[in-house]
Structure formats: structure tokens, C-alpha cells
Image: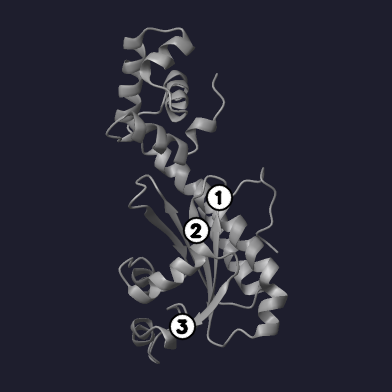
Amino acid sequence: MPLFWTPSSHCDDDTLRARLEAATAELEFEIYGLVTWLPLSANQPTAHLLTNADERWKSVIMNRDLGQARAIVDWCKTHHEPIAWNAEAMPSLDALEGPANDGRMGRRHRWSQGVRDSLGVDGILTLSRSHPIGVEEAQRKRFMFRMLATKAHQRWLGHVRARTIAELPDQLSPREIEVLRWFADGKIAEDVATLLGIKLTTVRFHATNAARKLGAENTTSAAYRALVLGLLHRPID
């Protein structure tokens, strides 16, 4: 399967799109939609979409208030097995995908697999086509689909994180990361000062700077955002 590359191989956005398109075709589907939710806000994660579907279909995928779609999302976030579904079961999508659609709307028959990275960041890969998914086919392709979803989510989330970090007004310094690590462990400023052998005012200075750079309201939020972005796991020079 084209998407099974080694972790060290280079993969930019265009390469990821091409590999997803090839893997989708290999599984005998036509359209893919990969959604990753980056939870910089724990209550309102931001959805990031990668798909070859029509623009109108993208707007439906990203509509978080669509009740029927929320049921599919909830299933994928709470089950390890993929779910097969169709537009007829979701009237709002069925109407959108009437017989006049140009074939790039996402098709009527879909197969969705939920995935989650090591930090608990959710994603869903959905493959779509015009004819149903049989039980025997689903059983035969289930493992390949799950592996595809896992690899795709890993790569797409890596791209999303890298873009988000690049868009920060300033990058975190090694000392700021070190301070945030201790705050993430539940230490208070006085503890961090003792552990690092620095002044309390210095700890507060670094914590304030880190929060500003991450767009966080306080140190707790800054430590959480740094963790979600994978910054706390980076080696410190």
C-alpha cells in the first residue's frame, strides 16, 4: 500500500495527498476525507480537513452542528472498528448529493475509521464510492483500512502541528519548554525555581513569555497547549 512509508521518509502536503489518493484507489474507493481535531482548546478542538471531495461536500464535513454527522463522529471516537454508512441514512447529505452531482461530492456509500495518536488527538478517515461495501469486503480490507487511517492521521497531524508551531509569533526557548514541563507535572512556580536552581522571578518571566507565545491565558493553558503541539517532548539543547 502506497501510504506505508518509513517514518524517516519525506512527505509534504502534495505527497501526502497523492499517497492518500493512490491508497484510496487501491482499496477500490474514489473519495477520501481525513479530519484531524487539534485540541488547542480542550472544549473546542479545531478541525483540519484533507480531502479530494467537492467544495460543497467539504462544507458538510466541517459542519460540526450537523446532527447526523455528529452521530458518525461520536461512533468513530468511541469504537475501534470502522463503520459503513450511506447518504440515504442521512437526509441532509442525501439531498446535497442528488443525482445531478458531479461525482466529486463524496459519493453515497462511505466507510469511516476513527484513530487517535499517542497524546489522544482524534482523527477520522472516511473513504467513499458509489456502490455499497459488502460484509466480506469489509472483513478482508479492515486491517489495511485501519493501518491506512493510522498512518494518514499520523502524517496529517504532523503537518497540522508543524504549521501551527510555525505560525506562533515567536518560538519557545529551551528554558521556556523546561519550565512548562515542570508546570505540566503539577509543580508551582516556587517548586520550579528550586528544581531548576533559578530565581522565582525568572520562572515567572519564562512562564509569562511562553503563555504569550502560545496564545494562552495562563501557565496551565500554556503547558497544555505545548503538550498538544508536541513541544514538551522535544530535546532541550
Crowding at dot 2, Cα within 10 Å, few <14 / some 14-19 / many 20+, comes out as many
Q: Which amino acid does label 1 sit on?
A: Asp
Q: Which amino acid does label 3 sit on?
A: Gly
In the drawing, what numbered circle is on residue 117? Answer: 1
Mark 1 or 3, which is nearer the eye?
A: 1
Question: The N terminus is located in which quarter?
Answer: bottom right
Q: Position of residue 51 (x, y in %)?
A: 47, 66
As measured in the structure, the alpha-carbon distance from the residue carrying label 1 to the one carrying label 3 is 32 Å
Mark 2 or 3, which is nearer the eye?
A: 2
In the drawing, what numbered circle is on residue 123? Answer: 2
Question: The C terminus is located in which quarter?
Answer: top right
Q: Where is residue 184 in the image (x, y as percent from the top left)?
A: 44, 30
Name of the residue lying farthest toward the left:
217
Q: Report if the CB atoms under discs 1 and 2 are less than 8 Å apart.
A: yes
Crowding at dot 3, Cα within 10 Å, few <14 / some 14-19 / many 20+, comes out as some
* Label 1 secondary element: loop
As measured in the structure, the alpha-carbon distance from the residue carrying label 2 to the one carrying label 3 is 25 Å
Q: Locate residue 181 relative to residue 118 in the image: left or right.
A: left
As measured in the structure, the alpha-carbon distance from the residue carrying label 1 to the one carrying label 2 is 8 Å
Residue pictured at 55% horizontal, 50% vertical:
117
Upstream in sequence: badge 1 or badge 3: 3
Q: Position of residue 33 (x, y in %)?
A: 48, 67
Upstream in sequence: badge 2 or badge 3: 3
Q: Report if the CB atoms under discs 1 and 3 are less than 8 Å apart.
A: no
Which residue is denoted by mark 3 in the rendering?
103
